[in-house]
Amino acid sequence: MTALPAQPFDFPFELAHCALVIIDMQRDFVEPGGFGESLGNDVSPLQAIVPTCAAVLATWRAAGGCVVHTREGHRPDLSDCPPAKLLRGQPSLRIGDQGPMGRVLVIGEPGHAIVPALAPAPGELVIDKPGKGAFYGTPLQAELQQRGIRQLVLMGVTTEVCVQTTMREANDRGYDCLLVEDATDSYFPAFKTATLAMITAQGGIVGWVAPAAAVLDALVQDAQIHDAPVDSAVVPVAKIPG
Ligand code: C5J
């Protein structure tokens, strides 16, 4: 076990029982022309976290840890999209409409894909989810149980919607969860700040928060404990862009 410095107190990190969960780093949320922008949002803060996510992902892979990618989206016939979700708000593009990156939030369309810098590698879990939380309507719980996973380290977007919802779902299922604070973002800076505070309040009522550099250090320490040093060329500790 490695004590990973975090808020509100050290996170008892064990790579063998921990999955890196990357939430919805999809073109539809992160790139101009996607669903996020159609709702009137500035996507640049979300784009800015991609290099930090990529640094953590590269090191996690090098250490041999379990990686899970999630994608929010719906079947082409939208049969898994509740009318309330489809109709809510006044976006210039609705789920299923044709946009610059194909049909918005529809599985298999270009906008539904994960951004190239974080593309899933062979063997990594990819969870397609119809809701905000990654456990609702998906096989995630069974997949994690099969792999002996008890802890989650989370990154991705958006902090207060799909990331926080997944973290709360995981918390209720007994997982210890840590959110990487500089590898998550929101279209609303105040919502990100509030979410980080909510997670760590009351002694970590939803979990822990730590910067990417602390996660990278913990990966190196975990590898040393298990006599399986992570290739230092792949570990950009304290050299995270941005
Ligand atoms: C949203 C998400 N914000 N991935 N989805 O609708 O957070």
Image (cartoon, rainbow, N blue to C red):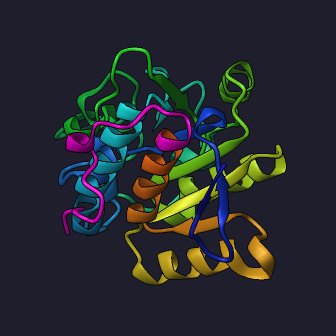
Q: Residue 68 at what x, y percent from top left?
A: 50, 32
Q: Is residue 148 left or right of residue 130?
A: right
Is residue 236 shown in magenta?
Answer: yes
- Which residue is found at the position 35% from the left and 32% from the top? 62
Quadrant of the image for the C terminus? bottom left
Q: Is residue 10 left or right of residue 56?
A: right
Camera-side residue of 128 and 100: 128
Q: Residue 9 at what x, y percent from top left?
A: 68, 74
Asked if residue 121 shows in the view, the reply is yes
Asked if residue 183 shows in the view, the reply is no
- Which residue is found at the position 73% from the left and 64% from the top? 206
Residue 173 falls in which quadrant of the image? top right
Q: Residue 76 at what x, y percent from top left?
A: 43, 21
Q: How many marks?
A: 0
Q: Residue 224 at what x, y percent from top left?
A: 48, 42
Residue 200 falls in which quadrant of the image? bottom right
Q: Main secondary structure of the magenta part?
A: loop
Q: Is residue 235 above or below residue 227?
A: below
Camera-side residue of 74 and 69: 69
Which segment did they paint magenta?
224-242
Q: Is residue 23 above or below residue 61?
A: below
